Image (cartoon, rainbow, N blue to C red):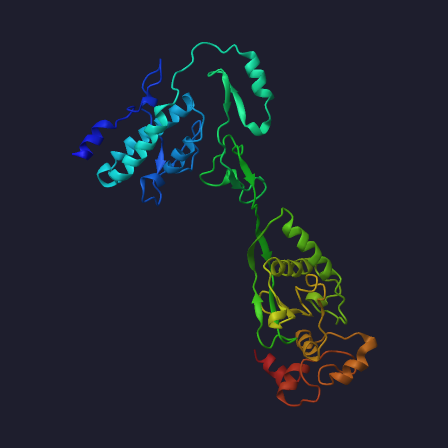
């Protein structure tokens, strides 16, 4: 019986605040969203009014009304809250039969706030120029403004702070996000810019890079493969700043010895795209906070997409001023790898004796890199070094 009586008492426009003097009864109610709410007071308001702020819960909104100045704007907002509760009570999910206790409490609070509220509408134009001037002269922290309709100085609407990124160049600019409160592309009042993020999703790697514990990467290493990568940073120039430093380090690397006709980083003139690609992978490592020292894999071997070694480097440490220690690797193992990749190439003339002494099975007396050991005899040597005998015979029979 009590529930039926309550339904009869509460109806749209049934609050005195919904019936201002010289105006029609207000039957409007607010747009709301339930979300994960399990209580009526936790239902979210989805629009702004004079005092009410989108995103507040019904409970928060009623609490805010307690501190607002009495008057027509407050009365209207109390009416909207009242009508919203009436409307919700008729909905299946929020039926009054299930939430009667909550509705009783909320209706009682709204009625108490409305009981002594001024609801009369002042008619006629405002001519209080002195009052208007005095209102505008008040300190900013008074948060007041002149209301020409009420012809008096009123408190400014409570502004709820909204946090987000206010930089249009950022990838998470607030006005570009779903459910933003921007109007005509302008940030809402009370907006506080914070947490901007810039994104680059066009970072392309051409070659394969393996970070290893041995100079020739016998362990296989941790590899970064060709592809397109996405990086994020907290400043607009986050990528360019790091890339420039990495490129300068790469460009300063001095290769100890170059063989004739070598490719990759050992060519007489290193292709600019190789330097750029190496600087790019170092930039990726730096921005992703990749620590090589902890794993002790500070050797770097660069491979073409089809697996050919084109560069061997050492001391690749992010911690040392962003890879500033990176240098050419000159171990015997690396030289042997380079020899095998460049048969027929010649070593620098001034170092022939040194190479012959240390790599007698790889470099002949003329400084030419041979494919197999000069001392090896038999079919393997015959086929590789001189196109004579059996090899010529096989070729002629094709």
Using the rendered view, name the quadrant where residue 50 is placed: top left
The image position of residue 154, as x and y in percent, is 50, 22
Describe residue 81's horizontal placement relative to residue 229 as left or right: left
Residue 264 appears at what percent x and percent y? 68, 66
Residue 24 lies, with reference to residue 235, above or below; the image says: above
Q: Is residue 387 visible?
A: no
Quadrant into which the N terminus falls: top left
When the figure is inspected, residue 300 is found, relative to residue 352, above or below; the finding is: above
Q: Quadrant of the C terminus?
A: bottom right
Which residue is more in the foreground, 207 or 71? 71
Residue 245 appears anywhere in the view:
yes
Task: Give percent across and percent down for residue 155.
Answer: 50, 25
Image quadrant assignment for residue 102? top left
At horizontal 82% and vertical 75% (from top left) the residue drawn is 349
Q: How many marks?
A: 0
Splitting the image into 4 quarters, where does residue 19 fall? top left
Q: Is residue 249 above or below residue 98?
A: below
Front-most of residues 355 and 15? 15
- Which residue is depicted at the point 42% across and 28% down? 49
Nearer to me, 181 or 213: 181
Q: Residue visible at 72% across and 63% down?
A: 324
């Amino acid at each position: 019986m009590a529930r039926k009586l309550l339904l009869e008492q509460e109806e749209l426009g049934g609050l005195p605040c919904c019936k201002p003097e010289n105006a029609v009864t207000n039957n409007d109610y607010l747009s709301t969203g339930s979300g994960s709410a399990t209580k009526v007071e936790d239902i979210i308001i989805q629009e702004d009014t004079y005092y009410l702020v989108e995103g507040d819960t019904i409970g928060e909104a009623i609490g805010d009304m307690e501190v607002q100045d009495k008057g027509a704007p407050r009365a209207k907002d109390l009416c909207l809250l009242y009508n919203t509760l009436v409307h919700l009570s008729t909905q299946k999910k929020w039926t009054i039969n299930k939430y009667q206790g909550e509705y009783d409490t909320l209706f009682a609070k709204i009625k108490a706030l409305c009981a002594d509220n001024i609801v009369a509408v002042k008619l006629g134009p405002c001519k209080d120029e002195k009052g208007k001037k005095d209102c505008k002269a008040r300190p900013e922290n008074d948060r007041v403004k002149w209301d020409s309709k009420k012809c008096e100085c009123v408190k400014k609407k409570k502004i709820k702070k909204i946090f987000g990124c206010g930089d249009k160049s950022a990838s998470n600019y607030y006005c570009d996000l779903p459910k933003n409160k921007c109007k005509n592309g302008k940030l809402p009042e009370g907006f506080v810019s914070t947490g901007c993020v810039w994104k680059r999703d066009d970072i392309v790697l051409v070659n394969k890079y393996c970070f290893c514990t041995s100079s020739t990467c016998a362990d296989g290493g941790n590899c970064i493969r060709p592809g397109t990568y996405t990086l994020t940073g907290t400043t607009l120039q986050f990528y360019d700043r790091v890339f420039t430093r990495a490129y300068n380090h790469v460009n300063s690397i001095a290769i100890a010895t170059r063989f004739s006709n070598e490719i990759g980083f050992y060519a007489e003139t290193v292709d600019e795209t190789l330097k750029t690609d190496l600087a790019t992978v170092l930039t990726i490592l730096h921005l992703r906070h990749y620590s090589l020292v902890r794993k002790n894999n500070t050797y770097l071997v660069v491979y073409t997409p089809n697996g050919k070694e084109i560069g061997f480097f050492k001391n690749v440490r992010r911690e040392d001023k962003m890879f500033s220690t990176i240098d050419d690797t000159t171990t015997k193992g690396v030289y042997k790898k380079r020899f095998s990749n460049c048969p027929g190439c010649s070593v620098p003339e001034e170092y022939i004796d040194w190479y012959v002494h240390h790599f007698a099975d790889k470099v002949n007396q003329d400084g030419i890199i041979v494919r197999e050991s000069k001392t090896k005899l038999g079919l393997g040597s015959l086929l590789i070094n001189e196109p004579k005998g059996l090899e010529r015979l096989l070729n002629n029979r094709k």
